[in-house]
Image: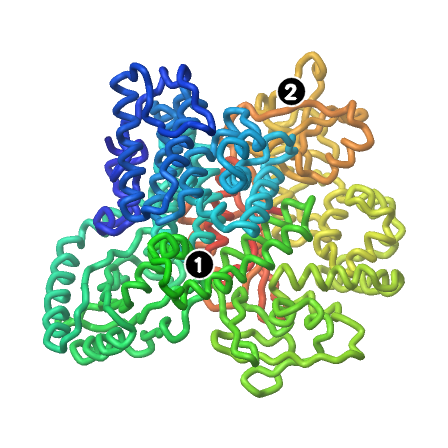
């Protein structure tokens, strides 16, 4: 039976090659018709059970289900005879008992899901403990079984993996961001202890994406956005390309269905032509390889839809301008044969200049190895060729999961391979992520922002003087490099040499640079100015921590200087701000003791001067009664505010004071507690449909509705919790809501055109755009857009985050 997620549109062109991720489905060895095991509750399944398949009178459906699971076990054992079959059988039986009678939204028995997850893990070549955890991964979360019981039944290893995958459900989170951030933080901390945790989670997410169609649209978009932002990049970092590609394509299909359909139709239009090109090129290359005595397998690999979409965005191309929609993959027996085959390819066809990459000599950060080249075939058509050994191909397909595949298939006296020895090196990128998770504990928004940068950005590799490779986000500097090597080296850094010559500390590092850090014991520590150009969250956190401990007066002076500098750049007058009631109130809302402490916090980098000025301005600015620009506001903010004013004057039944009235019937409040009080949307956080909201009963101005992550609301929760009300949106309306989005990126030609083209393609109106040059070849874009809901805004932010050169995108 096909997966419920399947539809008339395949998830990649040519419905994936035979070795694509669809082959990982449990269909190959587990029945897709696993029946509800109603009679299993009568059997005594304990940790002492020996064989799963013992039952007095099993039903026909139960026999079918057990037979299919037995096939999984037997197929796994045929390749890895040292596996503990009884462990797998007991794990399935326990999961089937606990999930009995429960169905998914697909209509299938719930046990289908853990069986499919276990099947994916088996195909990846994971060990028996991981597969058992795959069967059991939802039992604690959904069935109320304690980790202690799991340990007693299945051992500490299985229980540890299951606990690592289990979400935090016993904590009441205030916002979606907090819930997402804390669950991902828990996952990464568990992954640091055992990387199998994240592989199980990827298998879980993969099957959830395959069966996502029956879920409500808002839920599907939330899951797809999280998948594209975090889980697909994690699969990429781990080198598990099979899973990465499918997660990207399935997320793309959910988030941009219209664009997906367009690309699908365009690919289908040229399918026959490309199939002929592959057939002719394959036959010609195979003949030449055979003549040269090279044994190799040659096959075609179609481009995935999401990668086509990204290429169109990054290079500003139309579909017809993309000619390398397919690639030939050449699998050789040895590294020497790979280079020999490369010579044959270049002798056979014309090489495209500057399109050769040797990832065998210099592997990618996730240990991917291959020779990449582009040529013009006999018909003048562009063709990409990838050449690698069988072992490299296994690594490329299964990534870090190949570690367990190798261990499971290796003979006792077999020496470990070079890739096996580098297992620890391939996880070095995880250390700063874990450190960042610990450093940002309690601040979910910062953790998610930093995680997006750490796992989602392009990487560069930089070589230490000892020959070790350090991988850093694109745009990193010698200071980022120094802190990645060791925090003490970063703190004592006084200069840097790159490729033997002195460079400034804000120099942008490139692939293959050899970086030598100069230090001095006399150094007093990191400089404040470093915060303006460092990229990595780890470096930023260490610098801020050092500055926080410095002389208060120095921090205060620098913070005040920053406020004055930003104010001058925006032509604002802030005389008396330091002692103002507005800044004092804002300081308390942000957890500072007073205005002076807040200014000092700006000095050591905890808050940006821009953010603080915008917050004070939003609280202090009176509600104007005309459509003229408000003095002191940037044009983007003024334009946005004036539109809100006009809507307020049109829709509001009375005076709005400092807030904007919501349209009648948009917000649902408790009528017994609110009576005839009017409600307004708070201007400080500008909630839009889909945001989690709460109401606050003001003194004389009715009820204001705030986002639950609003700093003002946090203040009210501490001071006047009895004035807070439950509130919710009644549903999305056709009325547009303005929202501000801030985007920071590396400067490059065409950035603004790419951003506006993406927004226009999503049929979102751009109210205004302001660009600001920043130091160190960076730029900031402030965008005012009209959206119907927070879902649409989140989707836009996720797509903008993938634009080439973008460092961070967030809602203001």
248 versus 282 height, above or below: above
The image quadrant where one finds the N terminus is: top left
Q: Residue furthest bottom?
A: 501
**SS at circle 2:** strand
Q: Judge whether 499 appears above or below 154 on screen.
A: below
Q: Which mark is residue 669?
A: 2
Seen from the viewer's position, the closer of residues 701 and 90 is 90
The quarter of the picture where residue 520 lies is bottom right
Q: Position of residue 642 (x, y in %)?
A: 63, 43
Q: Is residue 634 visible?
A: yes
Residue where numbered disc 1 is placed: 754
What element does badge 1 sit on?
A: helix
Instruction: Give how far across and how far down residue 702 sits, in percent.
Output: 74, 24
In the rendered view, would you say 665 is above or below 738? above
Tell me the number on the disc at residue 335: none
Residue 348 position by quadrant:
bottom left
State left or right for residue 403 relative to residue 782: left
Q: Nearer the viewer, residue 538 or 321?
A: 538
The residue at 63%/46% (across/down) is: 445
Q: Is residue 266 visible?
A: no
Please indicate whether residue 705 sits to the left or right of residue 91 in the image.
right
């Amino acid at each position: 039976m096909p997966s419920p997620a399947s539809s008339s549109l395949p998830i990649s062109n040519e419905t994936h090659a035979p070795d694509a991720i669809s082959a990982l489905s449990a269909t190959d060895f587990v029945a897709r018709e696993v029946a509800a095991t109603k009679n299993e509750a009568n059997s005594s399944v304990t940790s002492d059970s020996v064989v799963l398949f013992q039952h007095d009178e099993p039903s026909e459906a139960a026999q079918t289900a057990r037979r299919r699971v037995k096939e999984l076990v037997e197929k796994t054992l045929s390749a890895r005879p040292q596996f503990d079959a009884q462990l797998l059988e007991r794990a399935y039986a326990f999961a089937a008992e606990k999930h009995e009678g429960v169905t998914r939204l697909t209509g299938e028995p719930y046990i289908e899901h853990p069986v499919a997850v276990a099947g994916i893990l088996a195909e990846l070549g994971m060990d028996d403990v991981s597969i058992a955890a795959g069967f059991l991964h939802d039992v604690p979360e959904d069935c109320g079984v304690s980790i202690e019981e799991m340990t007693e039944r299945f051992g500490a290893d299985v229980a540890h993996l299951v606990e690592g995958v289990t979400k935090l459900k016993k904590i009441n989170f205030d916002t979606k961001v907090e819930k997402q951030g804390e669950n991902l933080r828990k996952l990464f901390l568990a992954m640091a202890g055992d990387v199998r945790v994240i592989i199980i989670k990827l298998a879980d997410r993969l099957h959830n994406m395959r069966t996502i169609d029956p879920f409500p649209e808002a839920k599907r978009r939330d899951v797809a956005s999280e998948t594209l932002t975090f889980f697909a990049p994690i699969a990429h970092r781990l080198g598990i390309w099979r899973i990465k590609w499918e997660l990207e394509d399935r997320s793309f299909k959910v988030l941009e269905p219209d664009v997906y359909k367009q690309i699908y139709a365009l690919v289908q239009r040229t399918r026959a032509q490309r199939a002929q090109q592959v057939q002719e090129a394959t036959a010609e290359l195979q003949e030449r390889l055979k003549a040269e005595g090279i044994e190799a397998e040659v096959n075609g690999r179609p481009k995935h839809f999401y990668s086509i979409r990204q290429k169109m965005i990054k290079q500003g191309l139309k579909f017809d301008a993309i000619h390398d929609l397919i690639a030939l993959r050449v699998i050789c027996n040895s590294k020497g044969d790979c280079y020999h085959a490369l010579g044959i390819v270049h002798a056979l066809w014309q090489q495209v200049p500057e399109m050769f990459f040797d990832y065998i000599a210099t592997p990618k950060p996730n240990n991917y190895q291959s020779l990449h080249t582009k040529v013009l075939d006999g018909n003048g058509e562009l063709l990409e060729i990838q050449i690698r050994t069988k072992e490299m191909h296994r690594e490329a397909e299964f990534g870090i999961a190949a570690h367990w595949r190798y261990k499971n298939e290796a003979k006792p006296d077999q020496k470990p391979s070079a890739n096996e020895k580098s297992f620890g090196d391939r996880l070095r990128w995880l250390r700063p992520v874990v450190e960042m998770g610990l450093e940002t504990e309690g601040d979910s928004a910062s953790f998610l922002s930093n995680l997006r940068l750490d796992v989602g950005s392009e990487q560069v590799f930089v070589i230490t003087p000892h020959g070790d490779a350090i991988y850093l986000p694109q745009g990193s500097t010698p200071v980022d490099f120094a802190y990645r090597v060791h925090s003490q080296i970063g703190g004592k850094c006084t200069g840097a040499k790159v490729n033997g010559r002195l460079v400034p500390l804000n120099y942008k590092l490139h692939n293959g640079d050899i970086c030598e850090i100069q230090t001095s014991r006399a150094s007093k520590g990191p400089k404040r100015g470093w915060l303006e150009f460092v990229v990595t969250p780890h470096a930023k956190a260490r610098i801020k921590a050092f500055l926080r401990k410095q002389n208060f007066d120095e921090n205060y002076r620098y913070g005040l200087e920053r406020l004055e500098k930003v104010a001058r750049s925006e032509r604002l007058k802030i005389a008396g701000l330091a002692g103002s009631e507005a800044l004092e109130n804002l300081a308390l809302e942000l957890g500072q003791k007073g205005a002076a402490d807040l200014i000092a916090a700006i000095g050591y980098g905890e808050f940006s001067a821009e953010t603080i000025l915008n917050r004070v301005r939003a609280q202090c600015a009176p509600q104007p009664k005309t459509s003229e620009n408000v003095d002191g506001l940037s044009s983007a903010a003024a334009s946005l505010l004036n539109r809100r004013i006009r809507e307020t004057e049109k829709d509001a039944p009375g005076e709005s004071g400092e807030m904007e009235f919501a349209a009648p019937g948009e917000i649902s409040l408790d009528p017994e507690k609110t009576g005839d009080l009017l409600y307004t949307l708070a201007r400080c956080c500008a909630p839009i449909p889909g945001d989690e909201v709460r109401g606050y009963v003001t003194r004389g101005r009715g009820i204001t509705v705030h986002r639950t992550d609003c700093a003002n609301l946090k203040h009210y929760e501490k001071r006047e919790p009895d004035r807070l009300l439950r509130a919710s949106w009644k549903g999305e309306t056709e009325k547009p809501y303005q929202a501000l989005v801030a985007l920071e990126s590396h400067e490059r030609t065409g950035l603004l055109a790419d951003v506006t083209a993406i927004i226009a393609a999503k049929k979102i109106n751009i109210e205004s755009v302001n660009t600001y040059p920043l130091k160190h070849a960076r730029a900031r874009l402030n965008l005012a857009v009209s959206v119907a809901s927070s879902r649409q805004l989140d989707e836009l932010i996720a797509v903008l985050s993938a634009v080439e050169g973008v460092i961070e995108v967030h809602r203001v």
